[in-house]
Amino acid sequence: MSMHPSLRRVGGKTASTRNVLKRHERLQYLMTKGLWQEGRSIFGLPKIKQEKVKAKKAATKDETAKQTEATPPKTS
């Protein structure tokens, strides 16, 4: 049976983005951070939330010049 067109998402993805890592991904993360102890059970691992970092736009020369002009010089 086909999916109704109104239920389709743009880009072809039907699932939302994941916000928690899977078990093997958590294990790799703990190993890289040095938090994994040999002999420990793979069950009951702490959940690790994925953090998405948005890149900020680089300030243009005009904006930086305006910011430096707007700040009054320090007098001692």
Image: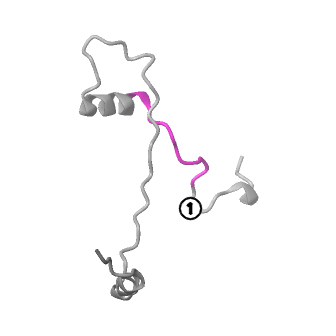
Say which quarter of the image contains residue 11.
bottom right
Give the main secondary structure, helix, strand or loop, of the magenta stretch: loop
Q: Position of residue 16 (x, y in %)?
A: 58, 48
- Front residue of 23/53: it is 53
Residue in view at x 32 percent, y 77 percent: 74
Q: Position of residue 18 (x, y in %)?
A: 52, 43
Q: Tell me the kind of residue under disc 1.
A: Gly
Residue 18 lies within the magenta run? yes
Determine whether 25 is above or below 64 in the image.
above
Residue in view at x 43 percent, y 60 percent: 54
Say which quarter of the image contains residue 50.
top left
Residue indicated by mark 1: 11
- Front residue of 32/62: it is 62
Colouring of the image: one colour
Residue 15 lies within the magenta run? yes
- Front residue of 23/1: it is 23
Residue in view at x 61 percent, y 50 percent: 14
| Quadrant in which the C terminus appears | bottom left
The range drawn in magenta is: 13-23
Q: How many marks?
A: 1
- Front residue of 76/47: it is 76
Determine whether 58 is above or below 35 in the image.
below
Q: Position of residue 31 (x, y in %)?
A: 26, 28
Element class at badge 1: loop
Q: Residues within 10 Å of mark 1 (few under 14, many from 20)?
A: few
Using residue 2 as the reference point, say whether residue 68 is left or right of it: left
Determine whether 63 is above or below 54 in the image.
below
Residue in view at x 75 percent, y 59 percent: 6
Q: Position of residue 49 (x, y in %)?
A: 47, 38
